[in-house]
Amino acid sequence: MKFFLSLATLFLVGRDFLNGQGISLNSNRERNFVFEVKQIDEFFERFNNEKNTLFSEYVAKKYPGITIDRHSLVRSLFNRENQGMDSADRKTFIAQVTDSSNPVFLDFSSNQWYAAIDCRFKHLGKFTDVALVLKIQQESNGGMKWVIVSAFTPQLRPESNTKVPAPRPNPSHFLNPMSQATDFMDLADAFDEGLHTRDYLDSSFYRRPFSIAFLRSLSRQDWEFQYVRRISYHFFQVQGWEFTVSYFQRNSANSGWLISSLKKVTPEEKESLREKLFQKSL
């Protein structure tokens, strides 16, 4: 007979449980590797409790007879080492998204989640950082791509956009919708000598003074893209909430892409947080 077991329990059980189930693991390293949320795509899979994933297949094979419910799965996606997160808010959030009568799922194609990317550039010969915000954009033909929503660096002062009209992007220049799987390595193409950067920009980019300042400076070839330093994801899809997903690399089953912060917000507060994100002031 099948029974339910929370992922938190699986994380915490010791050798006695594994031996009692007749399961032999070479070490905790195998378990940690499988339970690690390796990519943000996998975060979506687990949050939505999608079937036929590599993770679900592993659990079915290693723990036959055990069924993991969605409540436990979502709970496992929180960074358990964050002692500052309000436990009551976390419980309320989990109950809301896993409500059997009105469940909430994350939509990859939605424009209500963002990739916040800290990039290293070389500015006039000196290394400096630029904060980019990207979102998924769905095309009229059903295709998707990542577009750059904003750019911020304290090196520049905000400027007006009155002389920078948004051009029609070249469809042959775009950021692959799977760019997150390679940590946005193809951003190098978007900033290659500033030749085609505008093809990668969202129309809202031209409404942001800090973004315009960066674009104008980029057009003078003052900036040279180096690499991506850090990525986090910010979700505004769940009504009444905003949460951030960050990567935690550690020798633990509770590792990888996990919810690092959770905020209960009103619609007005959510919009304020969104604008702050675009200005690197969260």
Image (cartoon, rainbow, N blue to C red):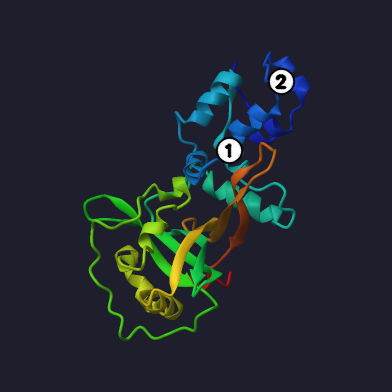
Q: Nearer the viewer, mark 2 or mark 1?
A: 2
Q: Quadrant of residue 280?
A: bottom right
Q: Secondary structure at mark 2?
A: helix
Residue occupying the point 49% across, 84% down: 157
Q: Nearer the viewer, residue 270 or 32?
A: 32
Q: Whole-percent x and y of residue 72?
A: 61, 37
* Three-letter amino acid code at the position of disc 2: Leu
Q: Whole-percent x and y of residue 67?
A: 57, 26
Q: Whole-percent x and y of residue 237?
A: 46, 56
Q: Secondary structure at mark 1?
A: helix
Q: Residue furthest front?
A: 125
* Three-letter amino acid code at the position of disc 1: Leu
Q: Which mark is drawn over residue 97?
A: none
Please state, as top left, top right, bottom left or bottom right, where the N terminus lies in the image: top right
Residue position for label 2 = 18
Q: Is residue 42 above or below residue 56?
A: below
Residue position for label 1 = 73
Q: Whole-percent x and y of residue 104?
A: 47, 48
Residue 138 in the figure: left or right of residue 233: left
Residue occupying the point 64% across, 27% down: 30
